[in-house]
Amino acid sequence: MSLGRTWTVSLLGLSGHLVEVEAQMNQGLPAFALVGLPDTAVNEARERVRAAVTSSSVTWPQQRMTVNLSPASLPKTGTGLDLAMAVAVLVAAGLPARERAARTVHLGELGLDGRLHPVRGILPAVSAAVTAGRPEVVVPTGNADEARLVPGAEVRAVDHLAELIVDYGGEATRPDGAAPEPPVDPRPPAPLVVPDLRDVRGQEEARFALEVAAAGGHHLFLLGAPGTGKSMLAARLPGILPDLAEPDAVEVSAVHSISGTLDAAAGLLRRPPFEDPHHTATAAAVVGGGSGFPRPGAASRAHRGVLLLDEAPEFAPRVLQTLRQPLEHGELVLQRATGSARYPARFQLVLAANPCPCGKATGKGLDCRCTPLERRRYVGRLSGPLLDRIDIQVDVPAVTRASLAIAGPSEPSAAVAARVAAARDRQRERLAGTGWRTNAEVPGSWLRGDDGGLPPDVRLALERALDRGALSMRGLDRVLRLAWTLADLAEQDRPTVQDVGTALALRHRGGGDG
């Protein structure tokens, strides 16, 4: 009896779990048994491993082989376990690298000819290995740049299984007998073109709402006729947000690694991401899911960035309602029979909508062909509980020649971004030690309590609005968050009564509760 042992990583959502791979050879009829709660892709690895080993000019052991994936209670998914299974089998068959293999983490999918194919999720997988105290990692060459983004990782890039066998002291050759071709230098990444607010003419109120949303991390609802610039404004929101801090950059990059959208050659994602799914997108495309193990959707890919739902009433009601969990908790929990996957989803939501199906119910609405019932039903597709979570709700009117003359030249994104960064710095200093970063994350109980430091005149004004029925308690909390953001933009230590009035105006589409 001979035993081979090595390590790999299995991902559950964004969490990587270290998996010990054991291979044991026993006397008996030749067979290859795989145990340890593997999914279909992992089960199929038996044929890939067998073919890859024989393609490397290594004789497959004619004995009963059992491979165990421990812990057995953890569901194992994906094709990234192939390489570890092959190494464990080869060590059990006599590969002279028992100690080295037993301390190394192996990740990668095997082709039938022995080549190593890159897999998704290398960044969180390698990060989990380093965190678990196993920094020595072997990955496919195509994943090497991404794996090296993890601090402390000792990465060994491999192009073919035969290359690793030789490195471990065995004898093997590639199918063609030739050395692997040197990798071709990738083309330099195209320069990132960030839309500038300078392109937006007029729309001073909407531009101000965009700045307030960026400064406090607030969600935004833009309502206006087609062509007024709603989508144009929303696309420029990421350009005025601050760069991601190091922990956020790693977390966001890990989500995009699992999604297969990370350009590792460009390094970690430092800028807030922007996602704008089409209104025909399914719930799985927006919040994540799919057959087998759930994958992150647009909401998670927009983590620490912006999620734009253009033509929001056209989205299926089920899609809109699934956003209530991430808006409330900042994460998505996708349940499956084999387990649950958690993905971060703390994004800024921007809803853009026309006032009616034809889009012309603005001003006096003389050109609108819709009935009053059709108008109510159209915007009514956005449920009250969803809109109640949107702090800023503004109209975007049509631009006129007179408004352009009054507005003058538009301010560039760089100037707005500087004020936003200063406001975020004030919030970070004020909220230090609380676990919150922006005003939008602060609970109302803290804002209303003594810790919030609310001036007496502001507290009195809010209480009067509450007594009149102009605000509910939830609406009061959201107005308070906006008032604090306005104070931060104005470089004030406390919000004023005027800030509360401006905050109420920014929520004027919230209904009777403000």
Image: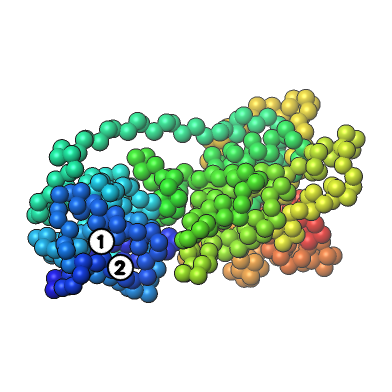
**Residue located beneath label 2 in the image:** 34
Q: Which residue sits at x=14%, y=45%?
A: 173
Figure check: 303 above or below 265: below
Q: Quadrant of the N terminus?
A: bottom left
The secondary element bearing badge 2 is classed as: strand
Q: Which residue sits at x=25%, y=36%?
A: 183
**Residue 92: x, y in percent?**
15, 66
**Residue located beneath label 1 in the image:** 85
**Residue 17: x, y in percent?**
35, 66
Q: Which residue sits at x=56%, y=51%?
A: 285
Q: Earlier in the sequence, mark 2 or mark 1?
A: 2
Amino acid under disc 2 = Leu
**Front position in the image: 53 or 136:** 53
Q: Quadrant of residue 48?
A: bottom left
Query: Is residue 249 visible to the viewer in this orientation of the structure?
Result: no
Amino acid under disc 1 = Met
Q: Indicate left or right for 380 with 208 as reference.
A: right
Q: Indicate left or right for 233 with 156 as reference.
A: right
Figure check: 320 above or below 467: above
Label 1 crowding class (10 Å Cα cut-off): few <14, some 14-19, many 20+?
A: many
Figure check: 452 above or below 429: below
**Residue 155: x, y in percent?**
23, 51
Query: Is residue 227 visible to the viewer in this orientation of the structure?
Result: yes
Of tags 2 and 1, which is closer to the observer?
A: 2
**Residue 70: x, y in percent?**
30, 71
Query: What is the number of the mark on residue 291?
Result: none
**Residues marked 2 and 1 touching at CB (< 8 Å):** yes
**Front position in the image: 472 or 62:** 62
Q: Indicate left or right for 255 with 451 as reference.
A: left
Q: CA distance from mark 2 to mark 1?
A: 10 Å
Colouring of the image: rainbow
The secondary element bearing badge 1 is classed as: helix
